[in-house]
Image: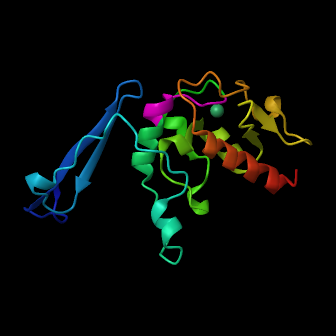
Amino acid sequence: MISYSQAHSDLRDIFLGFVEGWDDASKVFLITIYSHWVERSQYPHVLPEKLPPFQLADQIQAQESSSPKHNSNQPLFKFRVLQRYGPKCAVCSVDRKEMLRATHLRPVTNDGSDDPRNGLILCANHHLAFNANLFAFDNSTLNVVFRPQGPNAHDLQITVDSLRSLPELPDQRALAWRYRYWKRVLGL
Ligand SMILES: [Zn+2]
């Protein structure tokens, strides 16, 4: 990537970028741009197809609770979640990439990891509703569940009533964590 060093400058800054992964269904590339020179021996590898063993909690955070809050790598997380579940909201028919969010089941603020199996694709509306605890997923039935006093599926325009039709499922531990959390928040 070549950019102006400063406004009206004759100089240019040159950055190295690496295509680390791509997803045909979502039509996205993950490109990491480095601010410093990278030697050939340090070139990043293309993201592996196979995921490492699942980690629900962010390891660094879990080991060093006094360390500063880690920064979730949102572009990498979104890329990985899109790759796993495809570019469509898990609970409605929205499939415009511009409207989709990668949502953590166990949130980063609760030490949740950026593992894609700790994520789901939701549209912006359902991302907000999910994080406001207006609905959840029962980890044993995979059904969408609502608060006893509402709003219901119709109010929230939820048209898909379970996660069973997803091409892949989130990790059961991530689903169970979120469902327990939701019930605790609601006092159920
Ligand atoms: Zn939606």
Residue at 25% over, 40% down:
46
Magenta region, residue range = 82-91
Q: Nearer the viewer, residue 18 or 179?
A: 179
Residue at 79% over, 36% down:
145
> Vertical placement of 61 versus 120: above or below?
below
Residue at 48% over, 51% down:
114
Instruction: Please indicate, yes or no, whether residue 70 appears anywhere in the rendered image.
Output: no
Q: Nearer the viewer, residue 143 or 88?
A: 143
Task: Please give left or right for residue 106 compared with residue 139 in the image.
Answer: left
Q: Measuring from the top left, give residue 96's x and y in whole percent.
A: 51, 29
Q: Residue furthest top?
A: 165
Q: Measuring from the top left, give residue 118's x and y in whole percent.
A: 55, 45
| Majority secondary structure of magenta residues | loop
Q: Measuring from the top left, give residue 152's x and y in whole percent.
A: 84, 34
Q: Is residue 147 magenta?
A: no
Q: In the figure, residue 91 lies in which quadrant?
A: top right
Residue at 55% over, 51% down:
56
Task: Please give left or right for residue 161 compared with residue 79 in the image.
Answer: right
Q: Measuring from the top left, give residue 29's x and y in whole percent.
A: 31, 36
